[in-house]
Image (cartoon, rainbow, N blue to C red):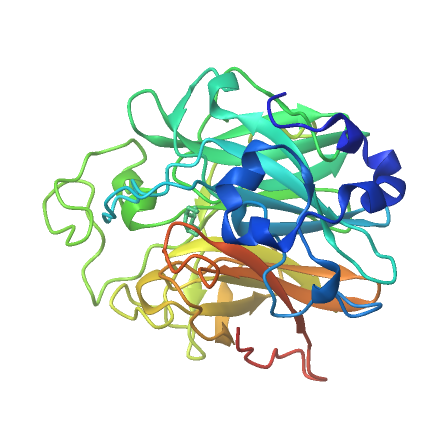
Amino acid sequence: MIGRSSSCTTIALAALLSVACRGRALSDAQNPASASASGSSSATAESDCTAGTLPLRKVLVKNIYTADPSAHVFGDTLYVYPSHDLEHNPAPNDDGDHYGMKDYHVLSFDHGSCPQAIDHGEALNVKDVPWASKQLWAPDAAFKNGMYFLYFPARDKSGVFRIGVAKSASPVGPFSAEPQPIAGSYSIDPAVFVDDDGQAYMYFGGIWGGQLQNFRGGAFTPSSDVTKRVDAHGTLPSGKQNALGPRFAKLSADMTSFDGGVIEVSIVDSQKKPLEQGDNQRRFFEGAWMHKYNGVYYLSYSTGDTHYLVYAIASTPSGPFTYQGRLLTPVAGWTTHHSIVQYHGKWYLFYHDDSLSGADNKRSIKVTELTHRADGSIPTMTP
Ligand code: FUB
């Protein structure tokens, strides 16, 4: 695989090799593109570390731009599956064409005295996905029966976002893509949650450039204006109507298809009234994530144009979810996207910002600690 370093290919050796993979000079941080071209490596400088803890609220990866971090613990190792932002400067638009990502890199963290991100190099490239044309957006991963699954959105050859799956025997890839997107999938930002009984579910969807509003009738309907969405086709609900919710599907036992139909998740307020589309401080925009704490299902997501990460809770994985509050105040940059993971007894919120580049489409992942109060609520964090 292009960009993969032979010294970082097998995760069984990751802890050992992390020393060899470390030490990329800080000057790479000022030029991620040049560092990326030279292949995989660790990206965190020793000076960024505090012994025994993940480097909190600091740029975790400096050799490439990374975003949309989906964190998972497989075995005893913390892995992050991010988007890989490119060193390019296209004109921004509401369709998100400036997020033109072409491949994925998987990261792992060596939980030594100074945990650091290890970049395992290219894990999947859009040219190796038979059905996809462009824009490898926010991915996620799951493990079942000895196999690792990478779930990812991309535009198909006709420009419609679908969700694909790729498989590997290794958590860091390389991943081999299925020839077709998951039947019945659409839009962006898959998040796969495996419940205590082993059943896996996918949450997905995103409005505006993520095209969720184009699937209100089931099939894709083009929209003439993705931000105003007031035409008869592919439009968002009006401000007082119920907001579009993330989509939810049960995954089949082999993890590569939906078992049954896709349903829309309802997010309601404390009076059990569905959030309205015009309530853009609270309604779903994109970037759904699921974690479970003390038997309660926590759905968290981005509010998009108001730039918050917020959460809602339910007693079942399909909801309805009751809105609770904000997880994270706005980061530097337009997009905000996260994951929540428990690792070595602590809970963490992974997120991204554009502090390294100053450009919306060149983001860098960070992490901060997340806590649950005695009543299960989560204090609002600041980036
Ligand atoms: O990274 C591309 C898109 O930006 C993601 O799919 C969204 O969640 C937003 O972060």
Residue 224 position within the rendered picture, expressed as x and y whole percent measured from the top left: 12, 40
- Where on the picture, by quarter, is residue 87? top left
Left-right relation of 211 to 338: left
The reply to whether residue 348 is visible in this rendering is yes
Would residue 14 be found to the left or right of residue 313 on screen?
right
Q: Is residue 83 above or below residue 257?
A: below
Q: Name the residue: 90% across, 42% down.
A: 16
Q: Is residue 346 above or below residue 319?
A: below
Q: Is residue 190 visible?
A: no
Q: Nearer the viewer, residue 302 or 238?
A: 302
View extreme (left): residue: 231
Residue sitting at the far bottom: 374
- The structure residue drawn at horizontal position 18% and vertical position 60%, both measured from the top left corner, is 238
Q: Please provide percent x and percent y for residue 64.
A: 55, 45
Give me the residue at 48% from left, 69% from top: 310
Q: Position of residue 178 (x, y in %)?
A: 56, 19
Classify residue 91 by image quadrant: top left
Q: Nearer the viewer, residue 39 or 104?
A: 39
Q: How many marks?
A: 0
Q: Quadrant of the N terminus?
A: top right
As rendered, which of 332 and 182 lies closer to the eye?
A: 332
Above or below 226: residue 352: below
Q: Which x, y percent locates residue 313?
A: 56, 68
